[in-house]
Each structure stands twice: as structure tokens, then as C-alpha cells.
Image: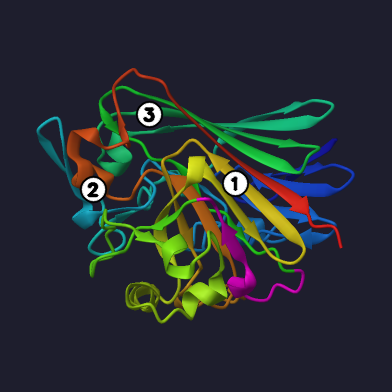
Amino acid sequence: MHVIIEQQTNGIELIKISTKQGKIVFTNYGASIISWKVDDNNIVLGNAVEADEFYPTHPFFFGAAVGRYAGRIANGQFTLNGHSYQVEQNDTPHHLHGGRNGMWQRLFDYEVVEGDDQVQVIFTTVVRSEEDNFPGNIDVKVVYTYDVTNTWTIEYFAESTEDTLFNPTNHVYFNLNRDNKVVDNHRITSDKLQMFPLDDTGMPQIETIDLGRVFGSQSVTLETLFASTEPTVAQQVAKVGGLDHPFEVHDGGLIVSNQDYELHVTTDMPQMVLYTFNSPSVWAHHMNIYKAHSGITIETQSLPNDINIFGDKAASILRANTPFYSKTAYQLKVIDA
């Protein structure tokens, strides 16, 4: 394996890792993945050439480590230990992805550990209460490991000075198509495909839609899902122009595939959010080359707004001085012709 560090402006550095078959690029800005090429096909959305201009300006969380809270919190309000908190309403009227001072828009410290069969990039930062109005300061470590099996593994480590919320994810957009056409031809597969519907404010409801029952299969293309005439599914797709929904899958395992590749996702997080990049046109910028459904995220996390749904049983509650750990892996497999 081979590693090159490239310096750009604005403090942005690229960590380029290559094997015989694959090449992956991370940056210290947002601890982001910005490129992943297998057989010269880039399967993630991003901009390595102009990273120093692109990443500080875009609003779409491309490939970034997201926190302290991934997903939305209704009206930016929650109660923890009897205390009420108001956090930034950056997705009016809701809080989204840690706000403008979240992890996705900061320069992380990092170190690179090289091995024969893998390379680790260890990113660290501190998320402070005065930056986002959540209780507690959190020491965060995000470890990316890329190995010779074309597997990118993410490990999250954290510890807070006070009881707080911590719900990290990575907001990588995948597109497995060689011609970069929309991802509607991608197939999602798991022995359990439970989709959480969204209410009229965009908050998840806890009564799930069993896609296996709706489609008679635990494997369905996005195109089929988007064209469904089943009333509940059709209503949910129309609500956001595709998917922006939490899912619960079997044992944290999901396969996203097309005719060439299978992306195997495994996680110990309880849910994941699938988002099909439904409204890229809201960013009026010369670097915005994207159209709706240019990619799909698999954001492994706990249920958005869980603190207001489950109260003191919410999975996102991190108790003071209690170590947090979570692991998600993405392995790309080439389908033999």
C-alpha cells in the first residue's frame, strides 16, 4: 500500500491511499472521504482537484464525518435530565447534522499509520458546548481504515464531560455507475427492509413500512421503489422527491448494488438513513455539477430526533465520562461478468 499527503490551500490536506486495485482519498476537512476509485471508477461523489475551494463552500455534507448529532432534531429542542436545550435551527425549523459548527466544517488533526495490508487515518477533534449549545465537551476520534480487500472501515470513539447527545455518521454519497448516471438503477438488499415514514414536518414516525411485504422481496431497486403505486410508499417518495428516510435492516447489514458492483455495509448502529440527493439545485455555484439522484447516502446512525421520541431511552444519549464506540464498514465487491 502507498500513501501520499498533498497540501492544498485553506489548511486542507489530502491523504491519498492506493493499492493494486483501489485508490481512496480522505481530507482533514470534515474528516471527509472525497474519492474512492476501483478499476478507475470513482464510486463516491466529491472533488479532489479543487478540494480547498469545494469543501468549505458546499452545503451537502459530501463524505464528511457528521456530529455531534446526525439527522434532525425537531425544532432544535430537546430535554435531557430535566433540562431543556435549544440548539441551532439550521434546517428551519429543525436542527440538522450538528449545525454550522458541526464536525463536517472543521479541520481535524490527524495521523497516518501504515501497514502491509492496511492504512489507518486517525482523525481527532473536540466538539465544545459553546460552539453548538449542546451540553458537554466531547473528545472525538474517528479512525478510517482502508485495506487490500477494498474495505473502508469507520470507527468512532468519544467521551463527554457531561451527559449529552452523540449520534455520529458519515455522509458519503455513493454512485456505483461507471457513467455517473443517476442511482435509480441501484438495488438495496437486506433480510429486513423497514422504512420509517416521515411526518409532514420531516420527522420520522416509529410505525415502519415493511418493504419486503410491499414488494414481495427483500431486494428492490430504487427505480421500483420510486415508481410504486402502493399509497404509503408513493406518498413518502413524493414527500421528499426520493428517499430521505431512516431504515432498519437485518443485523445492521445492507447491500447496495448495480450490474457491476456490490457495496456491503455492516454497522453496529441501530438504524441508517438512505438519502438520494433529491435537491442538489439549491446550491447555485459553478462547482455544482449534480442533478437529483446523483448519489445515495447510507448514513449509519440512531434514529433522527430519537431524544424527542424515546426520551431517556434514546440511543443517542452519551453519559458523562462514558466511552462511546461504534463501527461501520463499507466493502466493495466486483461482480464477475
> Helix or strand or loop: what does disc 3 sit on?
strand
Residue at image coords 32%, 73%: 232
* Three-letter amino acid code at the position of disc 2: Val
> Helix or strand or loop: what does disc 2 sit on?
loop
Q: Is residue 232 left or right of residue 273?
A: left
Let me know if residue 193 is in the magenta part.
no
Q: Residues within 10 Å of mark 2 (few under 14, many from 20)?
A: some
Residue at image coords 22%, 55%: 74
* Three-letter amino acid code at the position of disc 3: Ile
Which residue is the extreme one toward the right?
Answer: 20
> Helix or strand or loop: what does disc 1 sit on?
strand
Q: Are marks 2 and 1 in contact (CB under 8 Å)?
A: no
Residue 87: give x, y in percent of width and height: 23, 48
Residue 251: give x, y in percent of width and height: 50, 40
Q: Is residue 166 above or below residue 196?
A: above
**Alpha carbons under labels 2 and 1: distance apart:** 31 Å
Q: Which residue is mark 3?
A: 138
**Alpha carbons under labels 3 and 1: distance apart:** 27 Å
* Three-letter amino acid code at the position of disc 1: Val
Residue at image coords 63%, 37%: 153
Q: Earlier in the sequence, mark 2 or mark 1?
A: 2
**Alpha carbons under labels 3 and 2: distance apart:** 16 Å
Label number found at residue 87: 2
Q: Start and end of the magenta stretch?
A: 178-191
* Colour mapping: rainbow
The picture quadrant where one finds residue 144 is top right
Label number found at residue 42: none
Q: Which residue is mark 1?
A: 265
Q: Are marks 3 and 2 in contact (CB under 8 Å)?
A: no
